[in-house]
Amino acid sequence: MKKKYFIKPVAAIAAYMMVTQIATALPDPGMTVDASNTAIVITDPQNDFLSPDGVTWGVVGKSVTENNTVAHIGSLLQAAKKNGYEVFVSPHYYYPTDHGWKFEGALETLMHAIGMFDRPGALTVEGFKGSGADWLAEYKPHIQDGKTVITSPHKVFGPETNDLVLQLRKRGISRVILAGMSANLCTESHLRELMEQGFEVAVVKDATAAAIVPEGNGYDAALVNFRFIANDVLTTEEAISAIQKGAIK
């Protein structure tokens, strides 16, 4: 019979207090920003996530509305263009061949089932305009200005499956201000991979949003991880101020 071990109540309380003190004492590194080496990266600024007509609005709409996500992403894009910062968009597309996958995670299964981000093929934009995979209309002047770098699509959540890191490095970018959809999925996955790849990353917490489902609130989950992982977590106002002044802290 295996011996059972129990943490004494006093020890448990002490451990809890220690963890609480550590959590509240997390350092806040901040980040210097400069148009020469800092870029704005936006994940999935697409209709299926951000438009009331999008296929996910039923689960993300409340979070998008509460955070004023659409306007905040637009403000970031405008500030970036006005101040000479490069903008990178990491989109999510599914082509007919992607529907031949033999296995999928829970969200992948759902996205394929509802036709999220579907396009008729990699070599055609037939049916793209106004579709769920298209950019939100108000972002198009910024995204389609001939200067924004639109990467190849990421296929699950992170940029491991697209050329975002290559495009950033080829332009001498070492720091990223990150926003877009969806907070605990694509945005957080991009944060993790960019940090692993040696970039400094600040996340704009009100320029993202997430699904609220019976299993939990994805936005709340993301906020915790943003704080633990990123160099900084900002509001849109703070991010725009940093873009204008050249420093977050």
Image: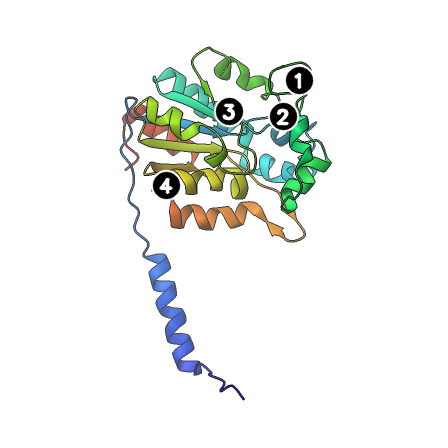
- The percent position of residue 209, horizontal first and vertical second, equals 55, 38
Q: Distance between the residues labelled 3 and 1?
A: 19 Å
Q: Which amino acid does label 1 sit on?
A: Gly
- Amino acid type at mark 3: Ser
Q: Which of marks 4 and 1 is in front?
A: 4
Distance, label 4 to label 1, CA atoms, is: 34 Å
Taking the spot 54% from the left edge, 34% from the top edge, the residue there is 181
Q: Do tag 2 and tag 1 residues touch (Cβ < 8 Å)? A: yes
- Residue under label 3, please give it: 152
Q: Earlier in the sequence, mark 3 or mark 1?
A: 1
Compare marks 4 and 3 and give the one earlier in the sequence: 3
For label 2, the residue is: 47
Of helix, strand and loop, which one carries label 2?
Answer: helix
- For badge 2, the amino acid type reads Asn
Inter-mark Cα distance, 2 to 1? 8 Å
Q: In this view, does 218 lie above or below 78?
A: below
> Dot 3, how many residues are within 10 Å of its Cα: few (below 14), some (14-19), or many (20+)?
some
Q: Is mark 3 on a helix, strand or loop?
A: loop
Q: Callout 1: helix, strand or loop?
A: loop
Q: Which residue is drawn at 72% across and 35% down?
A: 114
Q: Where is residue 233 in the image (x, y as percent from the top left)?
A: 39, 41
Q: Residue 195 carries which label?
A: 4
Q: Distance between the residues labelled 3 and 2?
A: 18 Å
Q: Name the quadrant containing residue 126.
A: top right
Q: Mark 3 vs mark 2: which is more N-terminal?
A: 2
Spatial separation of the CA atoms under disc 4 and disc 3: 20 Å
Query: Alpha-carbon neighbours of circle 2 within 10 Å: few (<14), some, or many (≥20)?
Result: many
Q: Where is residue 23 in the image (x, y as percent from the top left)?
A: 37, 58
